[in-house]
Amino acid sequence: MVQPEGLDGLRPARLKVGVISAGRVGTALGLALERAEHVVVACSAISNESLRRAARRLPDTPVQPIPEVAAASELLLLTVPDAELPGLVAGLAATDAVRPGTIVAHTSGANGIGVLAPLTERGALPLAMHPAMTFTGADEDIVRLSETCFGITAADEVGYAIAQSLVLEIGGEPVRVREDARTLYHAALAHGSNHVVTVIADAVEALRAALQGQELLGQELVVDGPGGIAERVLAPLARAALENALQRGQAALTGPVARNDAQAVARHLAALHEVDPALGEAYRSASLRTAQRAHAAPEVFEVLRREQE
């Protein structure tokens, strides 16, 4: 088993790293680890997109079959989608592809180290190292890693020390997550990121409907593609709201629900239902949760629940 060098300095030994597979996350982490002086000795890639990404981000790394990647690795990164992880682990265990003493780390948010049990039983050191970040495949992914927290779970303090060292080396911040809290951790991140995208997309749709046909002379037309007038109108407000929420918490709440303006809420619901009933329902649901957080007046709840009936 590879032991970290000098835990006080949090700098592990240089490791031979294998990456399964060369997707957005895998290649970003692979490149970040190479910049920290580890060596990515092999990666797996099947699709043309993955092959191109591996060639661009890890040009000196050979693309090999999964068993060969595993056999060559001291640190094996499993960066496949969550749904594919149990099958991959089972296959690696069944073929004895992973040597005893290998550090095996997956990047799934929803899973802890339990999913790695078939490999742990064969002598691997299991780690869960989830970067709390969305990856686009662009170069900005690498930059963002240096500002990213990683949810780490390990079997013992040696594992935590190794995971912490690796995360710190690439500029991230390690955050310890209990095995039994991984699902809650992942749900919180999904709620705070995926659902934000949905809310923003809904708001942009409503703005486009409100602005359509109202363009000033010489102004671009309101279109359905991203990056248009609606997005520019919303962007400063949305960014400020996010920053305020992260810095001020509950005090960042504003708008008609927080001001107990039940009539404005009712008008909002009617206008949004005209655009799309599903959009109106989404607004009602979010407003109800906002009303609960803001301890809104009874008349606000009456409007929101009346619309639900």
Image (spheres, helix red, strand yellow):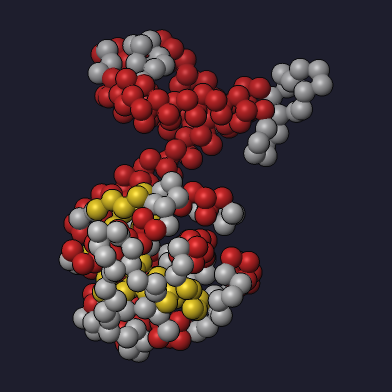
Residue at the spot 43% in from the left edge and 30% down from the top edge: 242
Instruction: Say which of 118 and 34 sits in front.
Output: 34
Residue at the spot 75% in from the left edge and 28% down from the top edge: 221
Query: Would residue 215 be seen by someone viewing this image from the given angle?
Result: yes
**Residue 90, percent from left and from top:** 32, 80
Q: Is residue 261 above or below residue 126?
A: above
Farthest residue in the right direction? 218
Q: Is residue 292 above or below residue 164?
A: above
**Residue 39, percent from left and from top:** 47, 73
**Residue 271, percent from left and from top:** 52, 20
**Residue 140, percent from left and from top:** 56, 50
Counting labels gives 0
Q: Is residue 65 above or below residue 245?
A: below
Residue at the spot 45% in from the left edge and 50% down from the top edge: 146
Query: Could you tell me which quadrant the N terminus lies in?
Result: bottom left
Query: Which quadrant holds residue 303?
Result: top left
Residue at the spot 60% in from the left edge and 24% down from the top edge: 233
Query: Could you tell me which quadrant the C terminus lies in?
Result: top left
Query: Which quadrant holds residue 69?
Result: bottom left
Query: Which quadrant holds residue 213?
Result: top right
Farthest residue in the bottom direction? 95
Query: Would residue 305 be seen by someone viewing this image from the given angle?
Result: no
Q: Is residue 70 above or below residue 150?
A: below
Instruction: Say which of 297 and 132 sits in front.
Output: 132
Instruction: Say which of 87 and 308 sits in front.
Output: 87
